[in-house]
Amino acid sequence: MTNACIFIDACVAFAEILGENSDIMDTFKLSIQRKKIPCYISLSAIGECTKKIDFTHIFFEKVFRTFSEGYFKYSRQRQRKSPISPLVKDDFGIFEDLFNQLRKSTGAVLQKPLRELEKKMVFELERILRKKIKIDICSFLNIFTSQALTLSANLRIQKVKYLQKQLGFFKIDKTSPDAAITGKLLTNVNASPRYPFHEDDANNISAAWSYKKATGTNVVFATFDFRTVNSHAEEIFNLIGLQCANPLYAPYYV
Amino acid sequence: MDISTGLLGQVNPISALRCGFSSLEPISIKKTRKKLGLKFKTVEWKFIRKNERNDLIDRYPSYIQFQNELVLEKIKLPPDFDAGSFSKMLTKNALERFKKDRELQSELSKLRKKKETAKPLCDFIVFMLKRHEKSKPENLLIMTELFAQSNLPFSFFADSVMLNEIFGGFMEAIQRKVNLYESVWLRRYADNRVLFHKKFQEMKRSLIPLFDVIEQSSFLQKCLNILVMAPNCSKTNSSFSIDFLDFKKVDFKQFSPLSNEFRVSLDNCVSTILTYEPNAFSSIPETDMNKIFAQILVGD
């Protein structure tokens, strides 16, 4: 076994749970297994996982409520149509307006998922109209709400499985972040104002640094977060001597 | 759909399972059967009531009433709200649902009256599991519709759906355990009455932690549902015809800690089930939303 380990970010844990970036994750897991590199997740990264799941709830609530509460009804009434009558071709215009409204009030990080949800909803509406299915807005939204609820519930189940019962390839490390290092990272790492280097990133890296200091092992911090972390990897390394990398490269820094 | 029926659901499957488990004792019956001209010795079970007075199936009404009273002890309803009548009405409705549930009634009576079979308890659990799988989409639709008929947080419904998902894992875990006992241990000690009953008691004891955690979650869910429902009906008599669940009317000082307690209990449920059955909850379902979740949670 090498005198080194990898700390993973919340996004890597979620990639494993959701089966996302599976090619990279499979290679990563194979590499660490071959090289016998222990893999950890810090308590601060686990805290970020919980926050992120709550964040998805807020996102879906905002989108679905925008459609279900008043706005759709108001738009239909402006077109002199009943709000509960089946969806028609003209409703594409209402969808566009509502998503434009949502885009304006949604932060940069959520623009991509918002666009994805918009695509799914528009494609579904197109399919429904093509097949001449009669469906009102409530039943239409139920299709997406039920999927979001199911996935959200299962995600929390998997979170317990991986982050509480530790039934995955990584184990929990309880080393606390070093407040001075967190502060240093937040003050010095120059992130763009659009994708700021936020406190959770700093805490997760800082916890990995604390472990490195306490055990004297070589620690690499693996994350998919390019914009706020990996693009500043060199800066972070010069500042605190800890390497950050995409899981694709992380085993090779050990 | 009627909101109150949606929130209080069908017959509580956990209570029903407790009924099936608590008051029945097995006795082993050895038989010799002929098959293809050969004689085979088989061991089968028959369930008998261990104590008529404590039979939970017969005492289901008082059991449900006790549960409802506990709920109303846990939460504080508005002072002008008649909690006593409300509790009575909840019990009445729960019992009506139980009486109308012919499928469950007949399966429970089968368990008591049926002739000996190889795995009676396992059969009952499989029945409950199948019933749960069948009702899962319906329960999900209820939650989805309630979300649309309310301004309650998305997480409130996600937690309820989580309990529904957990229940499948719970059933699988107890099925595995009961199957092991019914097909190995009880069969092995069929000749020895003392050891046979010892093993049966051991099986029941081993399942207690599972029942306890899931019943705790189910209880907290009921508390939350009643906490949300009660202030949204102006009179006790109209409590079962609520039009809209307004979150502004709900006592947030009670809702927030109760909601957190429910979440912790759900995590505890998953954790306990995984201790019994590490292969439970093997994968995440594939839906149109997976990519959106991945974009939010994994990012770049």
Image: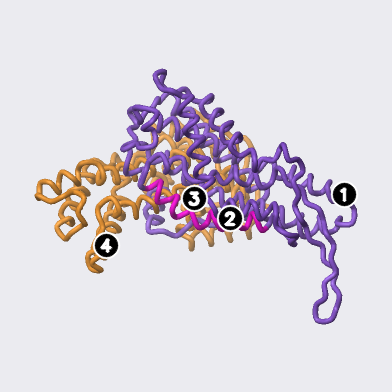
Chain colours: A orange, B purple
> Which numbered mark, 2 or 4, is in the foreground of this view?
2
Q: According to the image, label 2 marks what residue? A: B129
Q: According to the image, label 4 marks what residue? A: A123
Element under disc 4: helix
Element under disc 3: helix
Seen in the picture, residue B79 relative to A14 is either above or below; the reply is: above
Q: Chain of mark 1?
A: B
Residue drawn at (42%, 43%) of the image:
B6
Same chain shared by disc 1 and disc 2: yes
The prevailing secondary structure element of the residues shown in magenta is helix
Q: Disc number at residue B195?
A: 1
Q: Amino acid at mark 2?
A: Leu
> 10 Å neighbourhood of mark 4: few (<14), some, or many (≥20)?
few
Seen in the picture, residue A43 relative to B186 is either above or below; the reply is: above
Same chain shared by disc 1 and disc 3: no
Same chain shared by disc 4 and disc 1: no
Q: Chain of mark 2?
A: B
Q: Place residue B52 in its image quadrant.
A: top right
Q: According to the image, label 3 marks what residue? A: A154
Element under disc 2: helix
Residue B143 covered by magenta stretch: yes
Residue drawn at (23%, 44%) of the image:
A102
Same chain shared by disc 4 and disc 3: yes
Whole-number angstrom distance, CA of label 1 to CA of label 3: 41 Å
Check if mark 1's residue and mark 3's residue have beta carbons within 8 Å.
no
> Which residues make up the magenta segment?
B123-144
Whole-number angstrom distance, CA of label 4 to CA of label 3: 25 Å
